[in-house]
Amino acid sequence: MKVNDVPQDDVFDYSQGIKKGNYALDEQGKYVMVPSKGWDVDELINGLAYSEYLNKLEETRKEVLAGKKSPLAYYMELRQMIPQLLGKTAGIAAFRVKRHLRPEIFARLKPSLLEAYASALAITKEELKTVPQKPKER
Amino acid sequence: MTEEFVTEETLANGRKYIHGTAAHCETGVSSALFRDKGLDISEPMIFGIGSGIFFGHLPFIKWTGLPITTFRSIPGLVFKKAAKRLDAKIFRKRFRSPQKGMDELRRVIRTGQIVGVTTNVYWLSFFPRRYRFNFNGHNFIVLYENENGFRISDPALLEYTTDCSAFEMERARFAKGPLEPRGLMYYPLFIPSNPDIRKACITGMTDSCNQMLKIPIPLFGIKGMRYVARKVIQWPGKLGYIEACRQLAHILRMQEEMGTGGAGFRYMFAAFLQEAGELFGSKVLRELSDEMTAIGDIWREFAVVSSRIIKQRKSKREETFDKAGGLMLICAGREEELFKNLRDTVATLKS
């Protein structure tokens, strides 16, 4: 790749103005590091993963509002966790975390367990009881 | 952002630290740590000496639900290997207790020693929001404590230094999941003022060749590349078009998106070969550097072709998975040739 070939695409939503270093050959054929504004390919593949994350989050939010899942499920998705990971972070066995994703079981949880979940998810105990009324912004 | 961008910092003991930029987090951090100890060494040099170049497919470790395809060695290894080969003494420790890990970090930076830490990207708010995925392998340097928490230098992401709160630092260092950092912190204790760089390069190159050619498991090195290439070709038939695109995009993220200096570290390795070629005055090494650049260009083409496949996933055709997989097979063939040549060349070099 030559210095002039280093992509400088305008993808501000993705990069937010942060440049990425690329190694490329200058006119003398010597390698130099060239800051790149962004690349459409990076933007595209990141966009796929990012929208997948947001879609799943939104789906879970609706399920919680419909009473199919507990708010814990929403915040677990928000923190990009799975029951095993959340369990490990909160110090609760994964099979129990899975049970707590059911709204009727979640409603009966002891304050100490709620406390453990809230600090693992970096939210307050009050927040953990409900989900936002509006979807997370893109 | 209105604040002025700072690149020069004064450490706790009054020493100066100059922030530089890099293409990759671990090599950038290592190079900055060594420079801070008075050894001026470039990022590609660290990458080559630490044998960072690799290829591996890990179907049993899932990241965001998909198998990991990596273009580099295990996070943390490059620093360790590079330090050893440069005869440096290093401090490197993980912690069971977050409290102890944070105390130790504070204690060390108070002495004016800068520290490399491994973190989880999700918890770092100085990252752009679309970068923030649950990935345990980002490295940056902690400079000193301030009223916001810590002053840090992230060579791979930012062109200036920034702040990171103590809360974020602790969450990021002690995040759970695959490749748990467990608060890993590292810094060189002592670096010889005039290390034998030629010898270090030879060891690094030999090790790289072995990693690429000799691991007897078909998921690693050149064999791994061929394995993944064949899988790519089979995906649309096996998984359906949409899921195949998802998996392909996942490979591209590891190759291009996550700060590799372009083409999954291939350009960085070419830069290393070029520097080594000058160091040894070897024409063959310079030619190998050119060949690595050419291979990098094919990886780049693979990325472009794949992105076209993904873009047209609704309408389909034109570019095919056969073509993408084929490009990968070409890369595998040419890299095999290159590393065999490199192995033969290294045998003739004198330190």
Image (spheres, coloured by chain):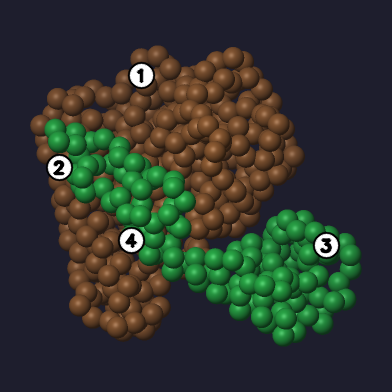
Crowd class of label 2 (few under 14; some 14 to 19; many from 20; radius 10 Å): some
Q: Is residue B82 above or below residue A94?
A: above
Task: Please state which of residues B338 and B4 is positioned toward the viewer in this rendering.
Answer: B4
The alpha-carbon separation of the residues under discs 3 and 1 comes to: 55 Å
Quarter of the picture holding the C terminus of chain B: top left
The alpha-carbon separation of the residues under discs 2 and 1 comes to: 27 Å
Decide if residue B152 is on the left or right side of residue A13.
Answer: right
Amino acid type, callout 4: Val
x, y percentage for residue B107?
69, 26
Q: Residue at x 56, y 70 (%)?
A: A54
Decide if residue A92 is on the left or right side of residue A31.
Answer: right
Front label number (4 vs 1)? 4
Q: Is residue B135 above or below residue B268?
A: below
Decide if residue A17 is on the left or right side of residue B299.
Answer: right
Amino acid type, callout 2: Asp
Q: Residue at x 88, y 62 (%)?
A: A112
Colour displayed for chain A in the image of the structure:
green
Quarter occupied by residue B283? top left
Q: The residue marked by circle 2 belongs to what chain?
A: B
Location of mark 3 (residue): A125
Tell me the SS state at disc 3.
helix
If you read the primary sequence from the N terminus, does the residue marked by circle 2 or circle 1 appear first? 1
